[in-house]
Image (cartoon, rainbow, N blue to C red):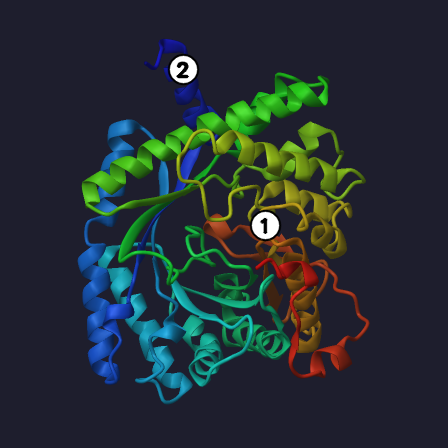
Amino acid sequence: MINFTEATETIRMITQENLDVRTITMGISLLDCIDSDLGAMKEKIYGKITGKARDLVRTGEEISREYGIPIVNKRISVTPAALLGGSACREPGDYVEIALTLERAAQEVGVNFIGGFSALVSKGMTKSDEMLIRAIPEALARTERVCSSVNVGSTRCGIDMDAVRLMGEIILETAHRTADRDSLGCAKLVVFCNAPDDNPFMAGAFHGVTEGDAVINVGVSGPGVVKTALEQVRGEGFEVLCETIKKTAFKVTRVGQLVAQEASRRLGVPFGIIDLSLAPTPAVGDSVADILTEIGVEHPGAPGTTAALALLNDQVKKGGVMASSYVGGLSGAFIPVSEDQGMIGAVEAGALTLEKLEAMTCVCSVGLDMIAIPGDTPASTISGIIADEMAIGMVNQKTTAARLIPVIGKKVGDTVEFGGLLGHAPVMPVNGFSCADLIARKGRIPAPIHSFKN
C-alpha cells in the first residue's frame, strides 16, 4: 500500500523537483515492410507506423492527466532503415525518400521524434549501409523529426575505421546542409559503439532486430530529485551518500514502471524496458552537473569529477534495478553539454574541457553528447574524436556515443542556440593537432582480446 507520506513525496518530486517521464517510445519492426519496389515499401512503412502508433500520443496524454505525471515526449523507433532498403534502394536519394516517409508518418501520429534512420556497421559496410549513410545529410536537412544513428563499433567486432572516416565527413556535410539553423541537423545524428537494441532516447533510438513486432519502452528522468535528496545529507560519508542516491533512483524508476505498464496495457503492446537514465534539461534545477557539485566538486571538470560521476552512475543503476523487472536501454547518467545548465556553466567557467568530458564518458551512461565545436574543424579531426570515443566503448564493454555539432560560421567562445530540450551551448575548443594519417588508414581496428569469451 502507498501511504500518505509517499504520495505527498511523489507530488513534491513532480511539482518542485522536475521529476518526469522523459519519453514513451514505441518500437516498431518494419522488417515485414521490405519490398523490391520502393514505392510499395514506402506505403507499407507509412501504413504500419500510423497503424501501430495511432493512439500513442493520446494515450500518453491521458496517462499524464490521470496520474498527474508529466510525460514530456512521445516517440517512435523503427528497424534500422539500412536493413530495409537493400533490394529497393539504388542510390542515396532513395533512402532520402524513406526518411521523408518516416517524417510523414511521425507528423501524422503526432510524435516529436522518430528514430531509426540508422545503419549497423561495426565490422563492415554493405552497399545498402553506405548508401544510407551518404543519404544522412540530405535526409536530416529535409526533415524535422527524423533522427539518425550509425553503430561503427562493438566489443565483439572491433571498430570499422572506414565507417568512422566516412562519419566525420557526413557530420561535417550535415552541418553545412543545416548551416542556416546553426547546424541543427547534427543534433539529430549520433555515432555509437555497442548500441543497445532497446534505447528509448533520441537521437540514438532504433528498434533492434532482436526485438518483437512492437514494444513500449519508457525513459524516466529525475536529476532534480536526486540533487534535492543529496542536499539533505550534505557532509555525510559515502555510505549515506550512496544509500540516498539508490533510494531516490528506486522511487523515480517506480514512477516509470507505472507509466510503462499502463501504456502497454492501454495500447495492447508488450512492455519492453525502463531506461532509468538521469537525463537533464536546460531548466534550472534539472541538471546532472548540479548533482556532481552537490557530491563535492566546485564545477564538473574539477579533479574528482570522474570519480563522482562513476559513483552516481553506479548507484542509480543499483537503485533502479530493484524498481523494475526489465531495466535496459542506456540507464545511468547523461552528460550532454547543451542540455544541462550546469555543464554549460562549467564550460563557460573554464572548468570543463573536451578532454575531461572524454574521461567522464568512461563511467557515464553514453558519451560525448551535444557538444558544439568550431565549424572549421576538419572532418579527419571529427573522425579522430569519434574513434577515441568508440575505443572507450569497445575496450570497456559499454555503450559509448558521439553527438558532435560543428557549427558552421561559429568559433570558440561563441554560443549556439538550439531551442527546446536541446538547449544552448558554448562552442568548445578542439585539439588543433592532426590525426589525418591515422584516419586515412583503411580497414578496422580488431576486437580486444577479452572479447573472445566462447
In-front residue for pair 149/268: 268
Vertical side of 126 occupied by 426: above or below: above
Q: In this view, does 88 lie to the left or right of 120?
A: left
Q: What residue type is labelled 1?
A: Pro
Query: Residue at label 1?
Result: 336
- Percent position of residue 189, x then y: 50, 65
**Residue shown at the point (62%, 50%) measured from the top left:** 337
Q: Which of marks 1 and 2 is in front?
A: 2
Residue type (three-letter) at the residue carrying disc 2:
Glu
Residue count near mark 2 (Cα–Cα under 10 Å), binned few <14, some 14–19, many ≥20:
few
User: Disc 1 versus disc 2: distance between alpha carbons?
Assistant: 31 Å
**x then y, percent, for residue 420:** 46, 50
Q: Quadrant of residue 305?
A: top right
- Please say whether residue 27 is visible from this viewpoint: yes
- Res. 307 image quadrant: top right
Residue at image coords 65%, 18%: 240
Tell me the number on the disc at residue 6.
2
Q: Which residue lies furthest to the bottom in this view?
A: 90
Res 427 visible: no
Q: Earlier in the sequence, mark 1 or mark 2?
A: 2
Question: Which residue is farthest front?
Answer: 454
Picture coordinates of residue 50, whole percent (x, y): 20, 60
Residue 66 lies, with reference to residue 199, above or below; the image says above
Closer to the camera in the image, 310 or 39? 310
Crowding at dot 1, Cα within 10 Å, few <14 / some 14-19 / many 20+, comes out as: many
